Every structure is written in C-alpha cells, then in structure tokens.
Amino acid sequence: MPPGLVPILSAANFVIGMGAFLVIGALGPLARDLGMGPAQAGWVLTTYALAYAVLSPLLVAVTGRFGRRRVMAFGMAVFALAALASALALTAGTLFAARAIAAAGAGLTTPVVAAVAAGLAAPERRGKVLASVFLGLTLAQVVGVPAGSWIAYTFGWRAAFALVALLALLCAALIWRRVPAGLAFQPVRLADLAEVLATPRLMLAIGFTAVFLGAIYVPFTYLAPLLEEKMGLGRGGVTAALVVCGLGAVVGNLVGGWVADRLGAARTILALCALQVCLMPLLSLLPLPLGLAMGLFFVWNACGYGFNAGQQMRLVALAGVRAPVALALNAACIYVGAALGAALGGWVIAGAGLGALGIAGGLAGLLAVGTILWSMRLSPVDTAPRRA
C-alpha cells in the first residue's frame, strides 16, 4: 500500500458523502431561493439517490476494462463538475439534472475505491484498511453535512456546493498522482449482476437495506425544516442537531458490529428495526426540551446506522463467492432507501404536515421488521451468533 493512499481514498469518500447529503441541512435556504416547498425540495436528494442506485452498478460493470486510477479520477472530476453545476443552477430542473450527474460520478468512484483499497492491502490488514477508507463516509455525516449546513445558512447553499466542487477536484488530482497505474482488477460483469438479481432470497436480504433506510429517511430528509418549524431553530441549532446525528451514526457503526458479533447479524438487525419503530414516532412530539431532543436524535441515529456491520456480515454469509456483487447492490440500496424515504416524506408533508413525519417513519419501520423476519425465515443459517 503506497504511503498516504488510504487517507486520500477516505477523503474522496468524505467529499462524496458531504456532496450527497449536505442538501439535508441546506434544504431550507435552497427551497426558499428556488421557490420550492419542502416536499419539492426533497426531490434534490431523491433524484441523486435514484440516479446512484440505477447508474452505479452499470457504470462499474462497463468500465471494468479501464485502469482503476483513471476511473476514480474521472468519477471525482464528474462529481466536481456536477457540484459546480449545482451551485450555478437557476431552476429546480437544472439542479435535479446536476444532482443526477453527480450521482453518476459518485457511483463510479466509491465502489472502485473499495476495490483498490482491498486489492492493495495485505490480506491480514484488508478489513482495517477498508474500515479506514469508508470512515470518510461516516465522517461526512459528523463533519461534512453540518459544515455544509452552516455554510448554506451563512453564505448560501450555492457556496456549499462550490466548496464540494473544489474539494472533489483536489481529490481527483491526488488520486491521479498517488494511485499506482495498471492495477489488476476483477471487474463486476453485467452477467454477475444478472445472476444475483435473479436470486429472490438474496435480493430480499439486499433489499432490506432500502426498506430500513427508507423508513429512517422519511423524517431525516426533512429534519432541517422540521426543526425550524417545531423547535424554532436557525443556523446554529440545525447545525448542532446534525452534528449530534452524525456522532450517533459513528457510535452506532462501532457498537453495531460489536453487538452483531455477539447476538448474530440477523438478530441485531431485527432489534434495531424494533427500536426504530419505537423511536421515530417520538419526533412527532416536537417541540421537546432541547437537551431531550438532542438525546433523541443521537439514539435514533445510533440505532439507525448500527445496522451496517450486521447487514454486511449477513450478505457475505448468504452470497458466498458472489459477495462483492451483493455488497455493491447493497450500497445502491442505501440510495434507493434515501430516495424512497424522501419521496414518502414529501407526500406526508403535503398531506399531513411536517409534524406527521415521525409517525410515518415509525409505520414504515414496521415494514422493515416484516422484511427482515421474512428474510430470516428464508435464510435462517446466519441467525446464530458468530463464535471465535
């Protein structure tokens, strides 16, 4: 592994995560500037998520014959140009188109980053290296998204996208300079994708990610306008709430893997689903005392992001040699879930207002409970705890 390469790859994931989700914290200023309501503005995230889910597996498959360095640098450059186009967008339609192009760049970069990290790391250090590389995506929740929110409220949402464009170009240049040329790589073929897609039992396990995160994103997409309306928070308060959510996500990632090792992957996922069903309706009780609300945001996100390790453990056990394909589709399902949740949340707002988002999220969480129970019935082998 070339010195300093892991931080560069992690930084690329950080910028992609920031660029993908900063709209959550900037939704209020963005909607007001472009004359959109909160529900319509939520389609900024929905468009990105749907484009990523559709384009990422296809782009990774069709670029398999190109050098990994070239693909990653090109993906980051596309992401940068799309972020710049977002900053310059004067209409909602132009912004939606720019976000779809950004999703193509991100969907081309992130899976290849994982492949390069795994391919260059020594086998005994592969897990640690991959965790370090994907730490960037988690840190984007803790630092990048709140920072984007603060910039959006202070200098305007266009400045936040412009910053992402600058950082993405810097990452593209660093990738071109530091990633070795001519890396050997086993590409994901369209035939491999078709084989996994044709396995209902495996696709149900993979699809759980979309259902679970879809429930969470019903309220999470609209957290900024919800806090503005129900809690009377402005720039500082919304940014602080997003920081707390990000910290909860980091803790959930760490604790979730520890719990899955002891309870088993499927049992851990089922418990987290049940907790989401109980926690999200509490968001409909806002306004709450600020300290209590922040505590709720922390626990809610810790339980939400705690599923990652268990879900990946489960998919590796179920997919066997097809695990790389299953994990790529699982990553796409993250964005499918975000898209579904944002769309459903928009419909809830249009029909019942912002205050109904928590209840709607809890009800959607029941669907996630049913999905994992059904999957456990079809695939029971991975429900036993792992033993040393």
Image (cartoon, rainbow, N blue to C red):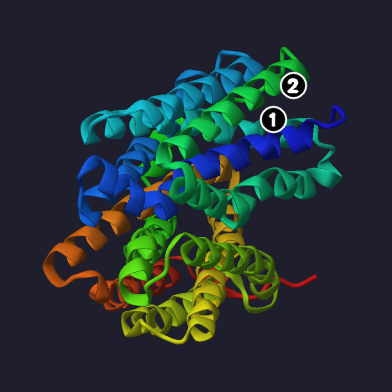
The percent coordinates of residue 250 (x first, y second) are 64, 63
| Residue displayed at 62% across by 53% down | 143
The percent coordinates of residue 71 (x first, y second) are 57, 19
* Residue placed under numbered mark 1 in the picture: 116
Q: Can see residue 95?
A: yes
Residue 57 figure quarter:
top left
Q: Is residue 378 above or below residue 15?
A: below
Q: Residues within 10 Å of mark 1 (few under 14, many from 20)?
A: many
Q: Give the secondary structure at mark 1.
A: helix
The percent coordinates of residue 247 (x first, y second) are 62, 66
Checking the image for residue 202, the label placed there is none
Q: Is residue 197 above or below residue 251?
A: above
What whole-number distance in Å separates the C-alpha atoms at marks 1 and 2? Answer: 9 Å
In-image side of 213 versus 3 (left or right): left
Q: Nearer the viewer, residue 14 or 36?
A: 36
**First in sequence: mark 1 or mark 2?**
1
Q: Can see residue 104?
A: no
Q: Residues within 10 Å of mark 2 (few under 14, many from 20)?
A: many
Q: Give the secondary structure at mark 2.
A: loop
The percent coordinates of residue 219 (x first, y second) are 34, 67
Q: Is residue 283 above or below residue 180?
A: below
- The reply to whether dot 1 and dot 2 touch (C-beta < 8 Å) is yes
User: In the picture, which quadrant includes the N terminus?
Assistant: top right
In-image side of 130 versus 24 (left or right): right
Checking the image for residue 179, the label placed there is 2
In-image side of 90 versus 242 (left or right): left
Q: Nearer the viewer, residue 357 or 236?
A: 236
